Image: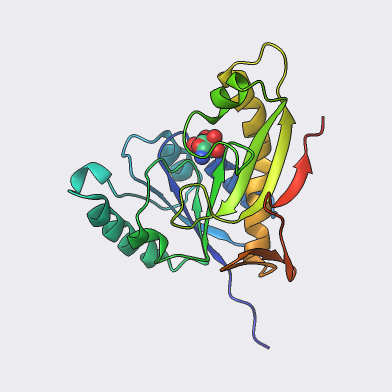
Amino acid sequence: MSSTPEKRISILISGRGSNMEAFLNAERHGALSGRVVRVISNRPEAAGLATASKAEVATAVVDHTAYESREAFDTALVEAVNQDNPDVVVLAGFMRILTPVFIDAFLGKLVNIHPSLLPKYPGLNTHQRAIDNGDKEAGATVHYVTNELDGGPPILQVTVPIETGDDAASLAARILAFEHIIFPEAVNWHLQERLVQEVDGAYLDGNKLPSTGTLREWQT
Ligand code: GRF
């Protein structure tokens, strides 16, 4: 009898690493359809590296400041990630813009979380922009990564209310708690081979997902 090989997860971070920690927690609770084989940071000082080490997960640093161009850095990052032989590469607060050198190497297995209701607010300062525009709702979106910044096919999106008196920090904190739920959930679909990226979008169980991805409403 042949057993299914364990699925392998590489996580890329740049900072705090709370989303990465959500994957480690899910794995510890038997709720992750794979194993986090390594956490790689482009910043040696990223706090998430210590969290990963404490959880006895292998870590590495590929310091972007040591490379002369984005492409040279991405080439080194491809080499590092390839050592992990991953089934999925999770961008968990990885704050470097990636070039096609990296994206094309892992196309179809590269997943990011973005703190907005994509396609609204790609890029930075998403929470402040939602507040400034008088939006009633904000949220986060898990999506496959393509060469269009924050423009790859959405997989799973959570909507949370913007409350009176919210500032960027309070809104970010409310959304973050839900990021920690939807990110491992979406990646599990990929690892379970229920979810695939095609040229025209993401497909779950053979059905094309809407332009927002699958929707989750905020629940208390
Ligand atoms: C999160 O808000 C995520 O949506 C964005 O970067 C932040 C990373 O936070 N891409 P953490 O490092 O996972 O705590």
In which quadrant of the rendered image does the N terminus lie? Answer: bottom right
Q: Quadrant of residue 169?
A: top right
| Residue 193 placement, left or right of 51 | right
Q: Is residue 140 above or below residue 171?
A: below
Front residue of this view, candidates 46 and 168 = 168
Q: Residue at x 51, y 53 (%)?
A: 90
| Residue 64 placement, left or right of 98 | left
Q: Quadrant of residue 171?
A: top right
Q: Residue at x 66, y 35 (%)?
A: 139
Residue 111 position within the rendered picture, expressed as x and y whole percent measured from the top left? 54, 55
Residue 116 position within the rendered picture, expressed as x and y whole percent measured from the top left? 60, 36
Q: Residue at x 33, y 61 (%)?
A: 101
Q: Is residue 167 above or below residue 205?
A: above
- Give the residue at the far top of this rendering: 165
- Give the residue at the far front of this rendering: 133
Front residue of this view, candidates 206 and 95 = 206
Q: Residue at x 47, y 65 (%)?
A: 107
